Amino acid sequence: MHAAVVSSFDEPPRYAEFATPVPADGQVLVDMLAAGLHPRVRSGASGTHYTSDGRLPMIPGVDGVARLADGQRVYFVADDDVPGTMADKALLDPRRAVPLPEAADPAVIAAAMNPAMSSWVALRRRIAFQPGQSVLILGATGNAGQMAVQIARNLGAAHIVAAGRDPQRLDLLAGLGATTVVSLAGDPEQAASAVGEAAADVDAVIDYTWGEPAQLVIPAVLARRAERGKPLDWIQIGSMAGAEITLPSFVLRAANLRIMGSGQGSVTAAGIVAELPSLIDQLVAGTLTAAALPVPLAEVETAWTAPTEPGHRLVFTTSA
């Protein structure tokens, strides 16, 4: 088969021949239709993701849309120990797949499911988020952050504070459902103070940044809360600004802060898969929108590093 093949963590994948994987018990070989280039995929292809085992060559891709032998199209999340989904064919565990309705666009599903899943699962599986509550999305100008704004609105959030750096994408967030938009550009402490003022009494935080923004925003928010005992669920999902923070111990004692993660391991595979059908329904209905940029898999080497417009997600497609 042909695939996007990573032979060096320092170079983009190349379109090349690769041995067709052989299904183990409980797996089926499927024809790939589309696979999204998510930040999780990029970090895996560069060997920097926390699940990377350092083995090369490898095929990137963690999910996608495929066609089964009977013609049914499905969205699926790949097992961790199989070749990735950016190939003509891939291995699929039926327990990690859900059928797609006829109206589903494979490129849109491949583009949207991974970034949408992060906040959808966080708000539905990690905490008991209720309509009328409020949320801060830290790192809202990334694709996952933009989807998180839409998902918070869809789940009934009364107040959505969206904070991010990219000025072009910040301008888009009010139209997606953000009630307050805060720039993280400029002086970090001033930006954190502005976020603290806007998000003082939110119920939950979806954090895609970690690093310095989180380190500064956490005390800025807690210091301004009208009621320190009111729970604040801080859900750590991404680390665009750094993998570590320093947090004074008194911050945890002085307020009801509950820090947790949401991702592989903190939510079971079965729990994630259980959320997929309702998320797919939202995408097919157009309640949630995603700007997919489909590109033939054969062009992976040049497309991998090419710039894309704000809000768009690259999707590699095959002719299957």
Image (spheres, helix red, strand yellow):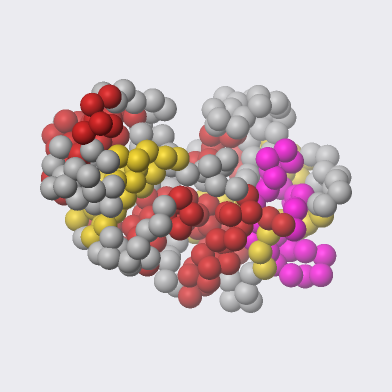
Q: Foreground residue, 301 or 108? A: 108
Q: Is residue 153 visible?
A: no
Residue 168 in percent (x, y) is at 27, 50
Residue 213 image-quadrant placement? top left
Residue 200 left/right relative to 262:
left
Image coordinates for residue 310, horizontal then vertical, percent: 36, 51
**Above or below, 80 relative to 104:** above
Relative placement, left or right, of 217 versus 156 is left
Please give the range of residues in magenta.
65-94
User: In the rendered structure, does residue 68 fall within the stretch colored magenta?
Assistant: yes
- Residue occupying the point 42% across, 27% down: 243
The one of 101 and 198 positioned closer to us in this rendering: 198
Question: Looking at the picture, how far across and down is residue 127, in whole percent?
Answer: 41, 52
Quadrant of the image for the C terminus? bottom right
Report the front residue among 110 and 156: 156
Q: Looking at the image, which is closer to me, 92 or 132?
A: 132
Quadrant position of residue 245: top left
Task: Report x, y in % for residue 182.
Answer: 19, 47
Q: Locate residue 114 relative to residue 63 in the image: left or right.
A: left
Who's the residue at 50% across and 58% down the image? 112
- The residue positioned 60% from the left and 32% from the top of the image is 51
Residue at image location 68% in from the left, 48% down from the top: 78
Q: Is 15 placed above or below 72 here?
A: above
Tell whether position 11 is magenta: no
